[in-house]
Image (cartoon, helix red, strand yellow):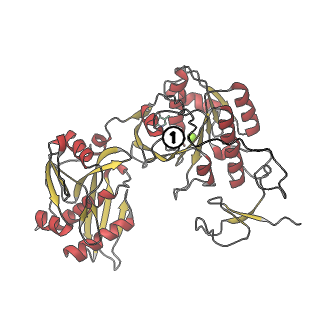
Amino acid sequence: MAKSPLFRCAACGAESSKWAGRCEDCGAWNTIEEAEPLSEGPGRRAAVSRGKGLALTDLAAQEAAPERRLSGVGELDRVLGGGLVPASALLLGGDPGIGKSTLLLQAAARFARQGAGVIYVTGEESAGQVQMRADRLGLRDSPVRLAAATNLRDILTTLEAEAPDLAVIDSIQTMWLDSVEAAPGSVSQVRAAAHELVGFAKRRGIAVVLVGHVTKEGALAGPRVVEHMVDTVLYFEGERGHQFRLLRAHKNRFGPADEIGVFEMTGRGLVEVKNPSALFLSERGAAVAGSSVFAGIEGSRPILCEFQALVASSATAQPRRSVLGWDGGRLAMILAVLDSRCGVSFAGLDVYLNVAGGLRISDPAADLAVAAALLSAREDKPLPEGAVLFGELALSGSLRPVSQTENRLKEAGKLGFSEAILPKARKMRGGESGMRLRPMADLPAFASDLFG
Ligand code: TYD
Ligand code: MG
């Protein structure tokens, strides 16, 4: 029987038996190409011959919890959920130049200084370049072992012989296997290389960290499929022109997902930020119209940040809606609620919304802080000094209570805020925060109370 051809999406790695103009999995156009079957991939043989029986186990049989080892970079360990897990594969994604190599070199150095065996394989830079960076970071004396290589067969042979505790592969897009006939960085190479490295990590009980570059649209360049293969996916993000960097757990088999770590990029590498709220609010001056302070939660961590809104009369028929650090669709929804429930129209007005400092907010509780910033900008009247806001907005205009109210209040109190504007809930307690609470049932009540 002739083998039917296999097609694969270059964007997400999804496979299909027929060609299509648009990938059904990720929706990308013109990304489906005929794929070479992987030489050793599963399910490629025509018929399956008889194998050996599996050793079955009970659900109750308990495997010991994986023994973790702290890397020595506190913020990284916290995002990992308490350190590195042996026999695990981790993907660190992020834009080029964001600081992935710097972070991993610092973590590798600290880990090695505790006596762990660490091998750092760079496929992007020369060994000399990495040594120069280590010099600049003051890490030259740390016993990390270094190789500049891209041939995975050589790399695996070396790792097999050296058996380190941690191997860093920087980056997965530069690695290639001679058994796969495709260019490095292509979907099939990245898939195959990741498959080999993940298998190696499990087999030999070694923690393997893969670096992956992310495209402008936020997708991991090459196949998203690497995300499914590894145990943990971390993203390193930040805005150009801003010093701080966020490390975010996107997926974590051994710890909480969505946890974040905060770093600052300095002349001497990445420095951990112990109090991110103070950093994000540091540029804030006296209260101005259009500015609101949001008491948010990112991961399990309370973070205060500032929303800035600007409303200006529009010169065009289609007014601008520009958002940085927040969801544009959500902004449109809030403008609609303000219009139809509070009678505050933004027609004919350009609206700009920023999160100060370049932070990206995903907490739904930001709705009230955004609505407040917009109202304040529209009415040209500052919000009360010393107030933080949080609450989720429904289309009806009512405010919904959100999670972790006490943690939000505590963080705000710690940073010297005295008042919280928040959704009305059945049990209202300020906790030990000492904050004055101003509960609001809905957005119209809020608008008339503060701007009426
Ligand atoms: P890098 O770790 O090479 O980024 P990636 O591996 O994600 O591509 O970081 C490069 C940037 O970081 C570069 O623009 C210079 C800056 N940087 C500092 O500001 N301070 C430092 O100590 C180091 C090592 C880099
Ligand atoms: Mg790099």
Total of numbered circles in the picture? 1
Residue 423: % across, % down: 21, 59
> Considering the image in quadrants, where does the C terminus appear?
bottom left
Neighbour class for label 1 at 10 Å: few (<14), some, many (≥20)? some
Residue 150 position by quadrant? top right
Using residue 128 as the reference point, say whether residue 39 is left or right of it: right
Q: Secondary structure at mark 1?
A: loop
Residue 25 picture location, percent across and down: 60, 65
The answer to which quarter of the image holds residue 355 is bottom left
Q: Is residue 79 left or right of residue 181?
A: left
Q: Is residue 271 above or below residue 181?
A: above
Quadrant in the picture for the N terminus: bottom right
Which residue occupies 57% across, 48% down?
213
Place residue 441 in its image quadrant: bottom left
Residue underneath mark 1: 254
Residue 284 vs 46, above or below: the answer is: above
Amino acid beneath label 1: Phe
Relative to 84, say whether 217 is above or below. below
